[in-house]
Each structure stands twice: as structure tokens, then as C-alpha cells.
Image (tube, rainbow, N blue to C red):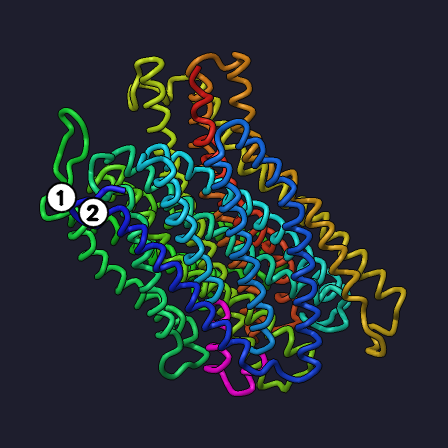
Amino acid sequence: MHSVSGISSSAAIYLGLAAGVLAILYGIILISWVLGCSPGNARMQEIAGAIEEGAMAFLRRQYTTIGIVAVALFVVILVGLHWQPAVGFLIGAVLSGAAGFIGMTVSVRANVRTAEAARGGLAPALAVAFRGGAVTGLLVVGLGILAVAGYYWILLDVNHGDETQSLGAMIGLAFGCSLISVFARLGGGIYTKAADVGADLVGKVEAGIPEDDPRNPAVIADNVGDNVGDCAGMAADLFETYVVTTVAAMLLGNLLLGKVAGATTFPIVIGAISIVASIIGTFFVGIGKVDRAKIMNALYSGLGVAGVIAAVVFYFITVREFGAGGIVIGTGALVRHVAPLNIWACAIIGLAVTGLITWITEYYTGTQYPPVRRIANASITGHATNIIAGLAVSMQATALPGLVIVIGILASYALVGLYGVGIAVMAMLSMAGIIVAIDSFGPITDNAGGIAEMADLPAEVRGVTDPLDAVGNTTKAVTKGYAIGSAGLAAIVLFASFSQELSSKCAAFHGCVAGSGIFSIESPYVLAGLLIGGMLPFFFSSLSMEAVGRAAGSVVEDVRRQFRENPGIMAGTSRPDYAKTVDIVTRAALKEMVLPSLIPVGVPVLIVLLGAIHVFPGITAAQVMGGVLVGAIVTGLFLAIAMTSGGGAWDNAKKYIEDGHLGGKGSDAHKAAVTGDTVGDPYKDTAGPAINPMIKVLNIVALLLVGFLIH
């Protein structure tokens, strides 16, 4: 590895490795602290044990299924490409699975401890829930940066310092993370919403019993689903986005600024700085007096501190990295000098986009804002008006995030070109550690409330867990907004990398270069690709929604059967067969996740095969592929935002009514809101979030196969 004027490549890698180790060590300290808290009485521990058993059983089966697919793909990559991307694929898959598995293991132990801590008030319960979630967040960024920096270090050594060859192999690492992510998002999402919808339809709607009532056979499966969907699934999602973004930004740095010392490894430096900033930020969560109205502020305080620290350190490290003279970008008449301040500004843009998307998502999903209250008010006049209002809010919620992303892209491009876009996206994703911590807070508090209800804890305990749960719904929605926004930007960076790689290969074979008409809108092949790509997120989402419906139907039938065959359940004289329902929804979810998951892998492969048999001759296969990628990014981004924001708004409209507004629980408005929430569940927790990894898998597979597109 060569020395550079600023931070050497080796120093950047060592910094990344050190930050990754620090994140994991701090995570271990938090694990010890959480497990040292009281797990409550015997009844609470029994319920928590059932949730943990169900969650672990699901993950074991899920990873067994994924493992079979992963081994097959490993062999294909090994034979078709090279051992370096194949090994990277395995590393990415294993570490992505580990981040979700370990984080969820802690979360299912933190939930009962949060319920017990709630006996002491809001502040202790908040501390346990957040620190339990912080373990997942730290594992995401810690293992992520270890994977990128560590494998890149190994590849540079193996390839004798050849950055281009090493980065080409790193695409395999990104693909391994993406494969796990799309399966985890779909499998966990189908599971959690099938259990939730099934429990609500029979429990709340038909039997008229409360949420988390222990008489409902699906209640344990519902609590399991919170963990496998919103904890393990989100961890895999953002782990993948984090790794993919880092690799894509490094690839852009090499392709565009290969002669600029340190440009390739600068994304690793950004990630390392933000890990330290995020760890410091966790100490500021919940400082001072915490009351019901300020729970969200208590969480945001940590995010704000982390962002400010990162922004300040980014400035000094950017100046040191690129020197007072800055860098030169562009070619020919487009050559221009870029000052270090421009590069730093791109990182600030990424942090600003994070803050804005977080706030916008909270606005559309928080109970204190007009959109949720409009849906709640529409519930007074019935189920149909609730659905209409929810759909309207979901579509409106796409406008502001879309504008923020557009402004972020244009501003960072104006400052430093495509590399500036990569730096902005990397800065945005660098905050994933504390963002995931805030997200994992949600399923922990949700489960804590369920345990409190099932264990018949005093009303004052639910008085603590209920507001935490309501805020948890918002944090989950906010994190999904962040994940979608960052995924959209990451996919754009991936497409830029694909276009640059394609142009270099195209120039070798056909004498064409980027910008000379490869992706001209006048080409029927590009247009065809755009239409196919634009259709894919809708088709993918439809399969996901249908999967939830079928799996939920299985849950409904089982719960009805148990109520019918065992009247003692409703009388409270006998216990439901929770394990049976958990097993049913597990089998249904794993069966249903396979077909949608294979779509983003299969479509690029099909295009390459059609090119190989000259259905798409010459450059036209590449044109179709480019169109597919752009079409999927555009429609996928907005469809995902609409689904997650709309679903979150429906959920909190129900919560708003349950808090005593518009007639409260049991009113006609509440019944309509339950219907809206049931429709929104697969929107926000299955189909919407799963679009994130889908569009990135499309781009990563296209990058892997770019060499086969020119013939």
C-alpha cells in the first residue's frame, strides 16, 4: 500500500479497523449492562422466554434457507468470476446475518428488562430500551466497517496494491450483504405482518379482545415478529446499505479520481469518524428530565450530538486528506480545481439530508402532526374514508423527501461532481449506528408493553410502556424513511459506478465513452429497460403483499380453530397453543419469501443471457440493463416512501384514537382505524422496506455482470 500526502491508504484502513473494534467492544459493554438489569418475575420471564424461543426458531430456519441459496450463488460466482468476489460474497453474507442475529438476541432479552425497569418510571425504561437497541446499531456499523476495511486490506495485499482489481472483488462483498438483506427484510416482514394482521383480525375485530391479550394464540407470534422484522430485518437492511455505499463510494473514487491520493479510502475515514461520534452521542440520550412529551427529543439529542461532532471532525480530516490545494476533477475543457471545503460541504449535505428526511418522516407519521390527525378524523365517518385519507397521506409523503434528495444530489454534484454525490451518501450512511439504535428501541418497547399486559403488571407500568411504544412506532417509521432515502441515494451511486465501469469497457470494444449516447432516451432499448425497471418494484411489492395475506390467512384459521375447539381460552381457564401459531407463521413466511427475493437477482442475469444469444445484440444489452436500473430506482424510491410513511401514519392514527381522542377504544372511529392499520401493516413493514435491498441488489448484480454486457 502506498503513502499519500494526507492520510495513507494503510492509515485509513487501520483507522476503519480500529473504529470497528471500538464499536464492537462498546457493544459488548452495553450487552453486559443490559443483561445485568432485572428480568422481572417468573411470569414475565416465561413470556419473554416464549418470545425468544420463537424468534430464534424463525431465524435458524430462515438462515438455513438463505444458506442453501448463498452456497449455490457462491459456487456460481467462484466458477463464473473469480475466488476474490466469491470469498467477499461469503464474508458479506455471514457478517450481515451475524449483525441481525446478535442484535436481535439482545433485543429479546432487553424487552422484559424494559418492562421491569418501567416500574421505576420513564427514564429507567428508556435507558434499558435504548441501550438494548444501541447494541444492534453498533454491530451494524462495527461489523460493516470491519468487513470493508478488512477485506480491502487483504485484497490489496493479494493483488500487490492494485486498487482497481481489489475494488472489483469488493463488489462480491456488497452482493453478499444485499442477498441477506433482501431475504431478511422479506422473511421478517412477512412473518411480523402475518402474525400482526392475523392477531388483529381475530383478536380485536372478531373476538373484541385487546391487543396483547394473552388469550389470543397469535400474541406471542406477533411479539416475535416485532423482533425478526424491525430488529433483525432493519439491521440487515442498513448493514447492507452501509457496506454497499462504502464500496460504491470507494469504487467511484478509484474510477474518477484514481490519481488523487487518498480518494479511494476516504469513505472509510468518514465511516470511522462517525462511529466514534455515534458512540459519544449515545451518552446524551435521555440526559435530564424525561417526560411523555419529550421522549422523542431525548432520543434525538444523541443523534444531534453525533451529527455535530461528525461535522466538525469531517472538516479537519478533509483538509488534512486533500491539502490546501484540493483536487482536480474532470477532463479536457471541463477540468477544474476543487477546494477541500467543497468536499467537506458534500459531507455536510449528507448529514443535512439525514436530518431533513428524519424530520419529514416524523411529520407524516407522528401523532402530534396534521397528517396522522387527518386520518384519525376521517375514521369518524367509516372504514372507507380512513383508507382514502391514508392513501392520500402516503402519496403526499413522497414529495418533500424526493425534493430533499434531488437538491442533495444537485448540490453535491455541483461542488465535486459524481465523487461529491458519493461522499454525501457516505456521510448520510455513516450515521447508521445511532439511527439503528433509535430504530431497535421500537420493537423493544413494543414487546415490553406486550409483556406488561400479558403478565398483568400494574397499570402504572403500562402508563410508562405505552408512551414509549407510541414513540417507538414513530422511530421505526423515521428509520424506514432514512433507510429508503439512503438506499435511493446509494442506488444512484451504484448506477454511477455501473455507468463508469461500462463506459471504460465500451471504449475498449466500441470506442464509445460515457455521455456519448449509451443511455440515450431515444434508444428503444433504453426505453424498454426503463419500463421494465419501473414495473419491477410494483410487481415485487405485489408479491410481498400477497405473501402477507396468505400467511395471515393461515394465522386467522389457526386462531379461529383454537377458539372454537378450546372454549376455555376465552374463559381464561386454559392457555392457547402459542407454539403452534408461531410454527405456522414461520413456515408460511419462509415459503413465501423465496420467489420475490429471486427477482432482483434473476432479472439482470436474464438480460445478460438474452444478450449472449443476441436477442439484445452488442451494446443493446447494456442499454436495457441501464434502463432497468434507472427505472427501478425512480419508482422504487417513491413507492417505498409512500408505503412506509402511509403505513406509519395509519398505525399512529389508531394509536391517537386509542389515547382517548375521537371516542377512544371501542368506538366506531377506532374500528375504522384498526382496519386502516391492518392495511398499512404490510405496507410499512413488508413491501415498502423490502424495496430498499431490491433496487440495490439489481444494481450490484449488474455491476458484477458488467463484463458480460459488452461482446
Residue 206 spot, x, y in % from top left: 76, 64
Sequence-earlier tag: 1 or 2:
1
Instruction: Characterize the local packing of mark 1: few (<14), some (14-19) or many (20 or more) Cα atoms within 10 angstroms.
Output: some
Q: In the picture, residue 2 is in which quadrant? A: top left
Residue bounds of the magenta highlight: 115-133
Q: Position of residue 552 (x, y in %)?
A: 72, 53
Splitting the image into 4 quarters, where does residue 386 fall?
bottom right
Picture residue at 55% right of the left edge, 68% below the top = 106
Residue that mark 1 sits on: 326
Q: Quadrant of the N terminus?
A: top left
Residue type beneath disc 2: Ile
- 123 in the magenta segment: yes
Magenta part mainly helix, strand or loop?
helix
Q: Residue at x 34, y 54 (%)?
A: 16
Res. 592 image quadrant: top right
Q: Is residue 389 visible?
A: no
Q: Secondary structure at mark 2?
A: helix
Residue 542 in the image: state x and y as whole percent: 61, 40
Q: Nearer the viewer, residue 183 or 350?
A: 183
Could you tell me which secondary element the residue under label 1 belongs to? loop
> Which residue position holds label 2?
343
Position of 255 compared to 42: left or right?
left
- Pick the front one: 384 or 504: 504
| Residue type at the position of mark 1 | Gly
Could you tell whether 81 is left or right of 576 in the image?
Answer: left
In the rendered image of this protein, does residue 503 appear above or below residue 600? Answer: above
Q: Name the one closer to the observer, 441 or 553.
A: 441
Mark 1 in CB contact with mark 2 (< 8 angstroms): yes
